[in-house]
Image (cartoon, rainbow, N blue to C red):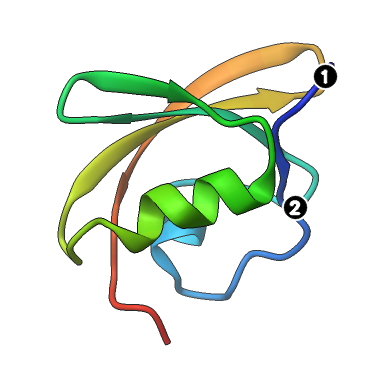
Amino acid sequence: AAGGADVEEVVSASPAEQAGIATGDVIKAITVAGTTSHVPDVNTLVGILAGLEPGTTIKLTIARGEQTVDVDVALGKRP
């Protein structure tokens, strides 16, 4: 699978962990307020997330092995 942001670590008790995101997942797309953006790499993902307010709910499209899953994540404050 070309492109995406590899999940290398999930912080315990973080919004990502609570949403069920796991190490080894690959984030392929992010949907904010009905607009979906392709995620070619981790820098793109970080850039999109940096512009969002804590408490915003987003949808991440994740490749997990052979499956593609969508998960909703309520953003927290950055540590």
User: Tag 1: Cα neighbours inside 10 Å, few (<14), some, or many (≥20)?
Assistant: few
Q: Residue at x 17, y 62 (%)?
A: 53
Helix, strand or loop for disc 1: loop
* Residue 9 % position (x, y): 72, 65
Residue that badge 1 annotates: 2
- SS of the residue under disc 2: loop
Say few, some or many: other residues with alpha carbon within 10 Å of mark 2 (under 14 / 14 to 19 / 20 or more): some
Which picture quadrant has residue 70? top left
> Is 62 situated left or right of 51 in this image?
right
* Residue at figure coordinates x 51%, y 59% from the top left: 17
Q: For the C terminus, which image quadrant?
A: bottom left
- Give the total number of marks visible in the rendering: 2
Residue 50 pos. (x, y %): 36, 62
Q: Circles 2 and 1: CB distance less than 8 Å? A: no
Label 1 amino acid? Ala
Q: Give left or right: position of 76 versus 66.
A: left
Q: Earlier in the sequence, mark 2 or mark 1?
A: 1
Which residue occupies the extreme bottom position in the image? Answer: 79
| Residue 65 position in % (x across, y down) | 82, 22
The residue singled out by tag 2 in the image is 23
- Residue at image location 76% in from the left, 26% down from the top: 3
**Rendering quarter of residue 26:** top right
